[in-house]
Image: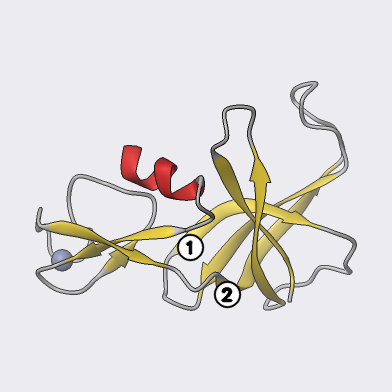
Amino acid sequence: MTPWWEATREGRLLLQRCEGCGHLQHYPRALCTGCGGTDLGWQESAGRGAVDSFTVVHRSPSPEHAPPYVVARVRLDEGPILLTNLVGDADWHCDQRVRLAWRTLDDGRRLPVFEQE
Ligand SMILES: [Zn+2]
């Protein structure tokens, strides 16, 4: 996971790419979920996608997550799906176009979140 997290410091969202069959996947794994191959590299996502599904959380499980917030599955245009947050004021709906934004963590790494396109 280290290359993936380091790239977030530069605002780059990496997808894992199988050099054997070209399959793209997220999150990073030891094996390609397409062919089982282990020759895996990286490709940068363009950061565009669509809301696959989402839910608005009104009761937070922990103090650092202030409700309400939106948890969503976003399907990137490249294919892989991310479990993420939707940010900003919007009347969210499925298939809504979104673009990558970032939430900076205390140590300088960033979490990919998405906003209305
Ligand atoms: Zn593969």
For the C terminus, the image quarter is bottom right
Tell me the amino acid under the disc marked 1: Ile
Residue ranking furthest to the front: 10
At horizontal 75% and vertical 53% (from top left) the residue drawn is 55
Q: For this view, does 116 lie left or right of residue 99?
A: right
Q: Which residue is mark 1?
A: 81
Q: Which residue is mark 2?
A: 48
Quadrant hosting ligand 1: bottom left
At horizontal 20% and vertical 74% (from top left) the residue drawn is 22
Q: How many marks?
A: 2
| Res 54 quadrant in image | bottom right
| Res 51 quadrant in image | bottom right
For the N terminus, the image quarter is top left
Q: Secondary structure at mark 1?
A: strand
Using the rendered image of the protein, determine whether residue 86 is visible from the camera's viewpoint: yes
User: Please, is residue 87 above or below residue 45 in the view?
Assistant: above
Q: For this view, does 20 lie left or right of residue 17?
A: left
Q: Earlier in the sequence, mark 2 or mark 1?
A: 2
Residue ranking furthest to the top: 63
- On the image, the x and y values in percent for residue 8 come to 49, 48
